[in-house]
Every structure is written in structure tokens, then in C-alpha cells.
Image (cartoon, grey):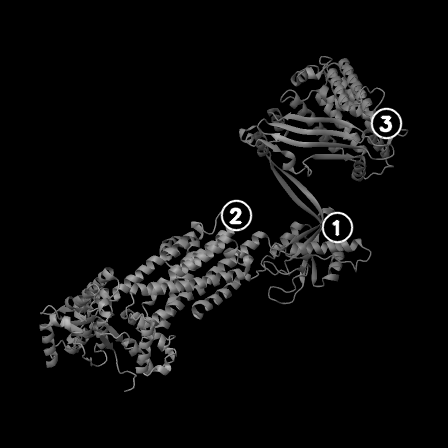
Amino acid sequence: FFFAIILPVILCAMVLLVLTISIPLAGPAINMSVDLYKLDSNGVDSSTDIVVGGGESLNDESNQTSFEIITAVSSLESTVQSQYPNAKFVHIEEALSSSDISQHLLDSYNDHSHNVRYGAYAFNDIINMSIGVDWDEILGDIRNLTESSLKDLGIVDISSLLGIASDDGKIEMNFTVTQFQKEFLRAFNLSLDDGINVTTAQQKSHIVLDRIIQSSSNSSKATVMIEGLRASWSSFEDILDGGQNSTNSSYSRALEQFINDTISSLTDGKIQDLNRTSPEQVSEAIMQNNVFDREEIVKGMVEIFEEIFGAFQIESANASQFVDGVVSVIDTAFGIFGLNGTEAPGNLLVIPVIIIDDVLEGAVEGLDDGALIVGDFFEPLNDLLGGTTGNQDGFISLSINKVEIDFSSLSFVAEGISLETASEVLYEADSLDFSLNTTLVSLIDSLLPSDSQRYHFALNSAASVLHNSSSPHAICAFNQAYMEYLFKRCVQKPKEARLVSVNHPLPLTDQETTEIKTILSVLASLFLLIPYCYIPGAFIVFLVKERVSKSKHLQLVSGVNMSAYWVSAYLWDISLFLLLTLLVMAVFLMYGRDAAVVFVGDTESFFCSMALTSGYGLSVLPYSYLLSRMFNNHSSAQIAVMALIFISGFVAVNAYFILSSIEDTEHIAEGLLPFLRTQPAFNIGEGFIQLSGAYWEREIMNSEKRPFDWDVAGRNVALLYLLSLPYFFVLLMLEYSNDGGAGGYVGRGLRWLKSSFEHMMLGFSGVRTGADGVSLSLDDGLDNGQNEDEDVAKERKYVIANQKRLKEEASVLMVNLWKIYPPSIGLFGSLLLGLKRVCRLVFCGCVRKSSPNDTEADTEADTEEDSKSTLPKRAVRGTTTAIMPGETYGLLGVNGAGKTTTLGMLTGDIGATAGEAYVVSSDVTGMVSGGVTAARQNIGFCPQVDPLLDLMTGRETLRMFGRLRGIVDNDKLEQTVNDLLDRLTLTPHADKISESYSGGNKRKLSLGVALIGDPKVLFIDEASSGMDPK
């Protein structure tokens, strides 16, 4: 019990310790420093070299560049070395940029020491970069807006897609005067008391307007149109200011009036109401009424903004780009609302010039010195945005509940729009629709450049960090050193100030945790096969002992049915294995569902692991029974079965997965798989590994695979349960073929096939039937009966003459009984030897080159040597005799004379080669239905070895065989047992286990087993062996 149950459970518990292994995927937390590496590649103490250079961005060919870099290097070096004395700075003066330093480091590529190639600094560096833009691809994507494939997208919520909406889904944008004032002053490096001279810009706007009128095709009409546009803007401006000319406090009404007045001026009064006119008609009327030169207007706008930018200290070159952007917006708007692909006419572009001139003129009015105080600029802006006087609390806020693009209709939809200032709502609408028609796409197409273009930039860097990519800590360490250097420059006590960077590994992600559990589970699955391979070896020990000690045969002689013997043994072993299964599953649960999650993580995994283990027991037990039949020593059988199952399990599983993972050997693995799946140990190993793989796929890939799926462990579970049937069936067939009284018609047929095969083998080995048709003859150098004793010959004649009568009267009758064992080399070996003999006869010169010194004796010796391994073994030669009731008959002979074999044939353990044998008129050759069974009811047998079970007492042994003999009455059984114990002088030892008996007492107990049940015929092999004369 200990070796079959307890020890395997302990081994499984030890193997599953692998599930508790903690695999550190990263090292401990460490402080980052530039002198992290204190040893070179040879393990010798060394400083960490830090390469420095730079000066490219200073653009100074004098010695001032070198001086600044040297100063910077010296300052950094002193700061760093105060904390990291192992750091050594190496200044490469000719390395002016990070590119130069990189090349220097590449030159030392063959030196892989981290202390030499850890990292570097480049001060006042220039980093050249370029961005490639494929405008054709971008335009292609824009054109796809009109393709039907995008229409399948339906409605897309832009606010959620871009992540610009708040938690409630709204888009809110706020502009405050305070925020604008702060950013404005910071951007232009101004203060509220600074003055900006805008007089020049205002004068330039007047000049430009005059030039625009002069360049027009009709100056008088142009003058009237400009005055009309100026009047419309002044009216709208008064409304915005809340002046006396305001007729409506609603900004939406004011905006609508401004647009109508503007359109009326642009179309010379032809269009008075936009609500009654289509956008195409408005655009057409504006185009027809145009008198201005578009190029002159754009040129004038550039000149005006150059003056404005100059006043704000902005480079005048940016004015042209700004004007181009304004013109592009106006052209796009005109194309969307008007004529497709048409540029905005001059009379539309002149509007921003008029507005700029009016704003500049208002700004200059009241200024004594022509300068606009910056602080005064924000007050009217604050008033415009609804702020209170003296407080910069004005703001404008835009709120949109939802912004969507409907790709099915290519339209832009905004809902819940609200534009308001601090004092009132400027605009409010429930929804706004905007069509993304092909006009917009075409305009964008015309505005964007074509082909692929590359844009180059030169970025100035105060300090660049270069790091060794093979050292993951380098970038952190060098950045920390430079940041600490800057930090010390900003504090009052730099010597005490520290800035520390710690590299602390992040906790494992769920995916990493799952992968580790899967790897450990696969290892556990493989190593579990080791104790699982040990289990069958422990179960067969008793069976081999029982067979070798003849206890099994004696039970069969005593009346046990062969099928009942194996079914009961199998059921008992299964019950033990089920107990083992429960204990193993308890071990799994003991490790917890977290560590053993693959095996017991959920109910289905638990039952799948249990099904694999119990199914393994069902199939491996008959499989090991079959293997144990090849051994006559229980220790050898245990070791061999463990080794064979280890090879078919642990080794086979590893070999299969290795072969299947290599492309060149994958076909070999697939070819071996059908055979491997006939092995119970391989099936349980594959099943456990498949459980691990399915767990990984469920957790990482969101697979739907479950433990009992056919492609997971379902196939293995089914095979383990189903394989128990053919293995047990083959076992019974082999047992039926060996025992003369088992299997009924099936057993008799199997024994006939076995006997026919043996006769064929004997025929190949030279065994022939004699002239009388009964005797056998073979040339094995032994007596063939020519010198038979007179009394033996007389007995033979008597028995043959009275065979029919003696069959009915004699207790034991043997007629010409033979037992010849076929040669050990088998049929194939016999064929090869026969071929060799033919070759020797026909081609003797080729097979064996004779020597002049060879004699006839040498030739005979060769023939004898060839025959040694091919001769059949004659155990019993034509025994003929009759033993009458009441007679005591003894077989005398030297060792190997065939005495034990004869008793084996008479008890049905060994099949006869030829002849007849009867016990109490029943045929015991196994070729007659029910003959051996009937004969065994009258046989008491004491074999040559003691057929005792070590752990049963003498009394228990006699009781068991008494019941097998049919003594069912308990009182009678006890009386019989006590009488035998007394007569055999075993009463003092009756309740001791037979293992403790002396050799003589064991022999006495074996005799008692043969005597119990009062058999008619008593066979005793080595009757006097070990017993005292009494």
C-alpha cells in the first residue's frame, strides 16, 4: 500500500512544488548612475568613460566655441564626480555634434565593455531631422470620403473618437481674457505698460485701399462698394459695442443684417435677402459684380501685415504665409457655399482689408504719440466679451452636445450648439448640418501639394544624450546625471541637493503572469509523468510474486476461474487507483487554485485532471499486466515496467513535441503520433500539456477552448478509458492460451493455435512423428528409447493394451506423453540457419574456406555449434503409465529429467506436445472442453516452490484454499483447518504470517494447502524438500 499509494502521492506533491516557483523577470530596484559599471569586460576594476563633445549650434569659428564647451564639460564633470567618483569624462574636441560622437563610438565598436561604451553627452548640439510626406496618399485618403466603402461606416461620433469630449459627451471650449492676456504677453515678451506703434500700419492700410481702388476696372464703382462695405461693418460694430445705432440686441440678428448688407453691397443691390436666394445665385452675382484686382488685394494685405508683425516684433516673412492662409480659408468657404473650384473674387477679398483698416483707424484715434498701450488693448476686448470694467473676467464659450459625421450621406452634423459671452448668448441652435460634398474634397485637392516631399529641420539642443542600446539602464542613468546637474544649479545649497533616479521593475502584467503559470504547468505536466510512471510498477509486484510462487496456479487448480481471477485483481487495483486519484487531486487543491490554476482552476479543469488520472489507471493497469508476463522476478519486472512506461511517457512526450516544433522533423512526429497514442503514459502527458496550452489561449487570446474539448484533453481522456478494453482483452486471451482449463471454447481455440504454431516450429527444428504415428523423434543427442528398461517397456505395453479400461479406472493415466519446447531463436532464426546450411552445402568455398589441417572432427564441431541455439528442448519423452487409486507413485530422476514438467502437464499449467493424459478420467491436455476443470476438482497439488502469500497467516491460507475447494460450512472449515494444522505440527505458528515461517514450516503449510478438501489425487513436487522425517 505504501509503495502503490502513499509514495506516488508524496512524489506528486514534490513535483508540484514547481508550480510555486517565483520567476524574477527583472532584477531588484537599483539607483541609476553613470558609473554603474565598475568593471571592464575582463572583470578588472575600471572607471566608466563618459564621452563628451559639442558646439555645433554655437555657429562660432573662434575659440569662444571651445571655451564654452570646455566650461560646460568642466561644470558637469565636477558636479557628477562629486557624487559618482568612478565616472571619467573624455572630451573629444573634434566631435562638434552628436553625429560626430556617434561616429567616434562606432569606431570603438569591437570593444564591447560597457564601461567604455556606456553613453555620451553632446552640448550645444544640432540634430538634423527630416519628415517625408506622401501628399498623393493623403489626397487619396481624402478622396475616399466619397467612396461607398466609407458609407458603410454609418454615423461616427467625432467627439468620442478624437477624445475631445468631456465625461458627459459634450465639447466645451472656453476663451478667457485673463488667459489670452497672459499668453499674449508671454509670447511677445511684453508687459501691460509697453506701447505698440500701430500708426505706420494704419497709414499703410489707407495707402493699400487707395491703390486697390486705382487698380480696379471701375474706380467709381469700387469706391461706392468700399464705402458700402465700410458702412455695413460700422453698423455691425456699433451693435457689437451696444451703441446707439443698435436696433436689435440679438447678435444673431445683427450678424444676419451685416451679411445681408454686405452681400447687397457686393452685388450692387441685386440681392437683398439671402433666405430667398440659393448660394449658387449669390456666388454668381458676386462674380459678375467684381471690379477689383485679386492679385493687388493679396499684395496689399501682405504689406499691411508686414507692418503689423513688425510692430509686434514678429518676422515680416511670416506675413506672406499668414495672408496665404487667410486667402485659402476665404477661397474654401466661397467654394463650399458657392461655385465649385472657383477662387473668391476681389470684391470678397477686399472685406478683410476694410475691416483691418477700420480697426487700425479706431486704435490710432485718441493716441497722442501714435502708440497703443498694451494694457489698453485688453479692456475693449474684455467689454466685448461681457466682462465688467476693471476686471478681466470676460470670456467667450462654445458648447456642442454632439459632433457626428454621417458617412452614408457624407454630412457633418452638430447638435446643441451654444456660443455665449460672460453677459449674453451670441448664438444658439439645436443642430447644424454641413454637407461634405465633392466640392470640399476638390478644394482641398487644389490646395495641398502633390507628390512626395521631404521637409528638413535642424533642431538646436542644449544637451543631447547618446546611450548604448545594449545597456537598458544607460538612457536613464545619463539623463539622471544631467538632470541632477541642472537641479544643483537651481538650488541655494547645491552640495546638499540630490536628484536620485531609481529603476524599480514594474509588477508582472496579467499576460506575463499567465505565461509564467503556463510554463510552470507544462513543466509540472512533464515531471508528473515520473511518479505516474512509477505507479504501475508497484501494482504488478504482487501479481508477479503470485505467478512465480505458483500461488496463482494453485488457486486455479483449487477451482478459481481464470476470468474471475483477473477481473477481481483488476477491480481491486482500480479501487486502489481511485483512492490514489483522490489523494493526487487533494494535493492539487492543496497548492491552491492560483498556483495549480491549469489543473484545478475551475470545476471543468478539476474534473478533467481527475478524468485523466483515473483514466490513466484504467488503461495502464492491464498494460502493465501484459508487460509483467515477460518477467519471472518481481524486482526485475517492477524496474522494467517503470522504465518502459517512462520511455513511452516522459521520453515520448518530450520527443514528440521537440520533433513537431522543428519543420524538418514535423512529418516524423505526425507519423509516430498514432502509435504513441496507444500508450497510456503518452496520453496523460499530452492531456496535461494540452490543458496548459488551452489555459494560455483562453487567458491571452480569448479562446473558447475548454478542457474537455476533443482537441484539448477530450481525445486523451477518451483514449485512456477506451484503451483499457483492448489491453484487458489481449491479457485474457494470452492467459487463456497458457492455462489448460481457462476460456472455454475461446481458450481451447487459442491453445490449438498456439499448439499448431509450436508444432510448426518443431517441424522446422527437425522434430518428426515416428513410424507408429504417435511417438516423436529428434536428433538432440539424447536417448530416443532404444535402451528402454524392461519394466518400463512392460508398463507401456500394458497401458496401451488396456487404455480404454484404465481411462475409466486409473486415477492418473499418461499415454505416450511428450513435451518438447521449441528452440529459443524462433521461426526467423530457424529460417536463417537453414539458409546458412544450404549455402555451406552449395557454396562451401565461399562460406567457409577449408584449411588443409581441418579434420572431420572440425567439421562436426562447426555443425554442433550451429545446432546449439536451434535445437528444441526435450523435457518429457513419451511417458506412458497408469496410477491406480490408492497407489503412491514416485517420479525419480536427475535434475532436468522432466518431473516438474510432467506435473505441470497433469495440472493443466503446461500444454503437452503430444500424447494423452487423464486425471480421474478427465482429459488434462486442454483440448477437451471442461476436461482440465473437471480434473482439478479432484487434484491436490503441492508445487516445487512454496505457493504462499507472505502476508497471510497459516490459518488464513488454509481457510482461503478450503473455501476455494468448496468447503462453505464455517464449522466444518474451521475443524478441517485445525486438524490439518495439528497433523502438520503448525498449530503454534498458525496465526503468524507465512513470511516468518522457516523453510520446513513453509513446506508443511504448502502440503496442507494440497491436502485440504480431501482430493482424490495428490501431486507433490519435491515432497521431502525441507521437511523433517517425522
Q: Which mark is residue 65?
A: 1
- What is the crowding at mark 1: few (fewer than 14 residues within 10 Å), some, or many (at least 20)? some
Q: Are marks 2 and 1 in contact (CB under 8 Å)?
A: no
Q: Are marks 2 and 3 in contact (CB under 8 Å)?
A: no
Above or below residue 89? Residue 189 is above
- What is the crowding at mark 3: few (fewer than 14 residues within 10 Å), some, or many (at least 20)? many
| Residue 96: % across, % down | 69, 51
Residue 861 quadrant: bottom left
Q: Which mark is residue 358?
A: none
Residue 523 in view: yes
Label 3: which residue? 364
Q: Earlier in the sequence, mark 1 or mark 3?
A: 1
Q: Earlier in the sequence, mark 2 or mark 3?
A: 3
- What is the crowding at mark 2: few (fewer than 14 residues within 10 Å), some, or many (at least 20)? few
Q: Distance of mark 1 from mark 3, alpha carbons?
A: 47 Å
Above or below residue 944? Residue 724 is above
Mark 2 vs mark 1: in front: 2
Q: Residue furthest right?
A: 368
Element under disc 1: helix
Mark 2 vs mark 3: in front: 2
Q: Distance of mark 2 from mark 1, alpha carbons?
A: 58 Å
